[in-house]
Image (cartoon, grey):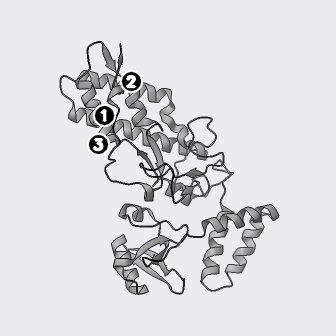
Amino acid sequence: MTAFKIQNVTRSKRVGIVANSLAELRKKGCNKLKIAEKSCHICLESDGTEVDDEDYFETLPANTVFVFLNRSESWNGYSSLLQDVFDKVLLLADRNEVASQIRDFISEVDSGEKYHLMSEFVGKLESNIEAETREEDPAWFEDVDNRFKNKEQYLKYSAQGRVRKYLAGAKEYFEKEGSNKTKGKLIKLQRAFQEELKANDFHGNYFVRSAEDECLCDDDGWFTCQGSYDVEDCSSAHTINPYSTKEARILFSTWNLDHVIEKSREVFPSIMIAVENIPKGKDLNWLYFYQLLFTTKNLKLVHIACHKKETHSGYQCDTNRFYKKV
């Protein structure tokens, strides 16, 4: 059982609760806060993200604070307010001095809105975004293998790991669905993918903040959710900086590199069709499929709350690009 905290929108009631699942949290929380389950929706206190997915719930750490809301209520979190205050404070004073003074203050007050707001503010002050090495920010590297000497090295490995999984998925699919007729062509295709990935360092730069190309974050390491597959931008303005704290690093692992044209439902089957029907005088346009599987021509970085697990209807491969002239 994991311990959490729950509250209503007015913060007039805030209690501890233990739960093993989102369903259990909802049932117990609604009972304690006297909110009807049918009309209840649950958000994170910190940024207002709605929690309605079991997979996302399982990524949240103990002592996460949830806000229970009726259908007509909303909660936007403290993030935008804190950022404005944070930016102004850093222009006026040393962040360590400010953090120390705030900690002295909140140790003298009862639990409540001031306590939790200022605690989150301290968390922002004490993040070590500029630090890069293990020596500069040892807390960030807790539980990280000793072979990683700096943050960029670890996050590059993380990006490469995601891309390698896509390659492994392709290999597994080809072995399962391929025939004697297509076996040789599929092996050749896998080799082409492998060589191109090696040439591009398995696109590790996606998460490297100092990279000159392919990087998905700004120079400080801030990533912005690009929204679900069927929209241009994230309406919730989700952001995260995995370079800041250990907690942010761990939470970033729940963000998805989502295929707009779906990998398993559309790209892999299209490859099989293309390989089985190569016209005379043509060759497979493997680079087109490479871009769909491994590059940001078809990948979007999305917060888990924006990752829709439904079928991406209307997003298909372009059959006119399956082949190229020999």
Q: CA distance from mark 1 to mark 2?
A: 12 Å
N-term-proximal mark, 2 vs 3: 2
Is residue 21 at all visible to an observer of this figure? no
N-term-proximal mark, 3 vs 1: 1
Where is residue 199 drawn, in percent x and y?
49, 26
In front: label 3 or label 1? 3
As drawn, the label of residue 265 is 3
Q: Amino acid at mark 1?
A: Lys
Quarter of the figure with residue 179: top left
Residue located at (39% from left, 82% from top): 30
Where is residue 37 drawn, in percent x and y?
35, 79
Where is residue 125 drawn, in percent x and y?
69, 64
N-term-proximal mark, 1 vs 2: 1
Q: Amino acid at mark 3?
A: Arg
249 above or below 291? below
Q: Amino acid at mark 2?
A: Ala
Residue located at (59% from left, 55% from top): 140
SS for dot 3: helix
Placement of the C terminus among the 4 image quadrants: top left
Q: Closest to the observer: 243 or 87?
A: 87
Residue located at (34% from left, 54% from top): 309
Q: CA distance from mark 2 to mark 3?
A: 22 Å
Q: Closest to the observer: 108 or 35?
A: 35
What crowding class fits label 3: few (fewer than 14 Cα within 10 Å), some (14-19), or many (20 or more)? few
Please state if 108 lies on the left or on the right of 75 as rendered: right
Whether residues under marks 2 and 3 lie with C-beta atoms below 8 angstroms apart, the answer is no
As drawn, the label of residue 192 is 2
Where is residue 26 drawn, in percent x and y?
37, 76
SS for dot 1: helix
138 above or below 204? below
Q: Which residue is mark 1?
A: 171
Please state if 151 lies on the left or on the right of 318 as rendered: right
